[in-house]
Amino acid sequence: MTKEEIISKLTIIVKPYVQNENGFKNLNENTDFINDLEINSANLVDIILDVEDEFDIHIDNDAMEKMLSIKETVTIIQTKINA
């Protein structure tokens, strides 16, 4: 799966939790979930659960703590898919 395909799916997963619409409109690889999209930590857990379901992967606590930006999340998803 390409980075673009992952980002496309991630955009759909993240949208319901976004508090900053301007940040969402400008979403890119460097977008930070908390600072740019104003997603709270409880919703980050929901996003991670949705990512696990969507990509049929398991995300451990170490990986979960790193999933704060689009770029990091894509890297973790790609690593898990290719494992």
Image (spheres, helix red, strand yellow):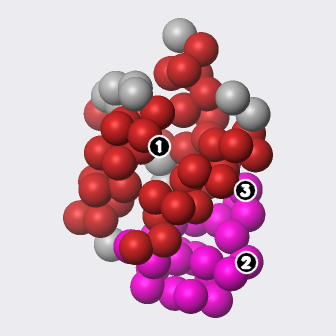
Query: Which amino acid does the dot numbered 3 rest on?
Result: Glu
**What residue would you read off at disc 1?**
66
Q: Secondary structure at mark 2?
A: loop
The residue segment tinted magenta is: 17-39
- The local crowd at label 2, few if under 14, some if 14 to 19, many if 20 or more residues have their Cα within 10 Å, is few
Task: Tell me: residue 77, above or below residue 22.
Answer: above
- CA–CA distance between discs 1 and 2? 21 Å
Expressed as whole percent of the image width and height from the top left, the position of residue 60 reads: 32, 28
- CA–CA distance between discs 1 and 3? 14 Å
| Residue under the image location 28 percent in, 56 percent down | 46
Of labels 1 and 3, earlier in sequence is 3
* Left or right position of 64 against 10: left
Expressed as whole percent of the image width and height from the top left, the position of residue 47 reads: 37, 55
- The local crowd at label 3, few if under 14, some if 14 to 19, many if 20 or more residues have their Cα within 10 Å, is some
Q: Which mark is residue 29?
A: 3
Of labels 1 and 2, earlier in sequence is 2
Classify the position of the N terminus by image quarter: top right
